[in-house]
Image (cartoon, rainbow, N blue to C red):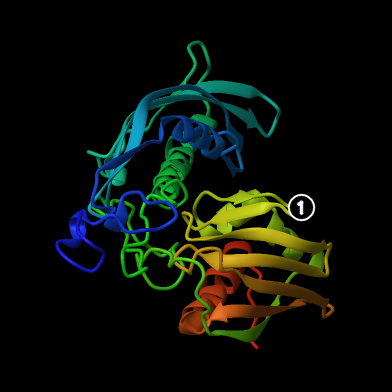
Amino acid sequence: MAKWGEGDPRWIVEERADATNVNNWHWTERDATNWSSEKLKELLVGLSVESDDGKCEVTEVTKVEGEASINNRKGKLIFFYEWNLKAKWKGTSKSGIKYKGNIEVPNLSDENEMEDLDISVSLCKGEPDTPLFDLMKKEGSEKVRVALNSYLGLLKTEFTQGMILPTANGVTTQQTSQNKVKTDRTQIGSSSTAAPHTTGVKIPTCKFSLRDTFLTSPEELYRVFLNQEMVQAFTHTAAVVEPEKGGKFRLLEGNVFGEFQELVPEEKIVMKWRYNTWPSEHYATVTLTFTDKGNETELKIECRAVPECEEDRTREGWQRYYCQAIKQTFGYGARLC
């Protein structure tokens, strides 16, 4: 065996605590089937769409058949997944009449682009025709597509943590050979795909604050940040929001996640908040303060411990993908202070 610092580094076993797969040279594989099965059910059940005709909701995932795995070779992640999914939906008209139907996705696979995904929506046999069927076929199927795209994002961020080990120089480099999760307007800031840095290194941080006004009450604006359906509405993608102290949140295809630390109804929200590309386990502290200004609400956003190199991106992200998106989605538009 060569000594550290000599010879071909691909074959050197560095003396370190884990002593495994140094420089990520050897092939490793992780089975993502069970995790994927649960995550797909979590993302699909409860999805809903609504119109003047009534409301439709995915009530149950009846079939999750397939497999998923991730391989690491020479620091490159290779994703394999193939799923056949079936689910049930129900619709309730404004007059209270209930309808039932099915959803089928036969080709969720790494070989198919998300926009080519076949999402079949049908009514159960014997059910009369209803405008809710058209609602589910159009808007409902698109929500299902967004949720499945979110699954792919989480597979490539949340589940892969720890698969790429630090190399000899202490830097972690993560690449993916398949990058089919497209960067679009729902992603905050730049389209950087850099992996989180390793822990144990102090980084320079900064703080900044923003103020904005919204034509709504503090009660309603406070609810926008904690109601999962409202978060999904203004981010235009699937989200996970647990509205309680210690509750987790994850949105924008896994690009943003964190934990609620303090919740004071109609007054304040304090959260640990981070981009998935920030150094591992590094969180900013974001405090939202809601002030009643009569016919409108002033929102003060205080961000602390933001990496200095991420200040502009974080500031722009909060202005564009929170404040502006909320105003455009819910009609709370007002002049930016």
Placement of 214 over or under 232, stated as above or below: below
Residue type beneath disc 1: Glu
Where, by quadrant of the figure, is residue 22 drawn? bottom left
207 or 105, nearer to the observer: 207
Q: Decide if residue 55 is in sight here.
A: yes
The residue lying furthest to the bottom in this view is 337
211 or 157, nearer to the observer: 157
Disc 1, SS: loop
* Residue name at image x 80 percent, y 62 percent: 263
Placement of 24 over or under 6, stated as above or below: above
Residue 238 placement (x, y as % from top left): 52, 49
* Residue name at image x 51 percent, y 83 percent: 311
Left or right of 232: which side holds 70? left
223 or 21, nearer to the observer: 21
* Residue name at image x 62 percent, y 86 percent: 208
Q: Decide if residue 220 is in sight here.
A: no
* Residue name at image x 52 percent, y 69 percent: 321
Left or right of 94: which side holds 14? left
Quadrant location, the C terminus: bottom right
Residue 245 placement (x, y as % from top left): 77, 55
The residue carrying mark 1 is 244
Placement of 140 over or under 184, stated as above or below: above
Residue 66 placement (x, y as % from top left): 36, 25
Left or right of 167: which side holds 234? right
Placement of 240 over or under 89, stated as above or below: below
Where, by quadrant of the figure, is residue 67 drawn? top left
Q: Tell how many labels.
A: 1
Where, by quadrant of the figure, is residue 54 drawn? top right
The residue lying furthest to the left in this view is 8
How crowded pointer 1 is (Cα within 10 Å; few <14, some 14-19, many 20+) is rated as few
Residue 285 placement (x, y as % from top left): 66, 72
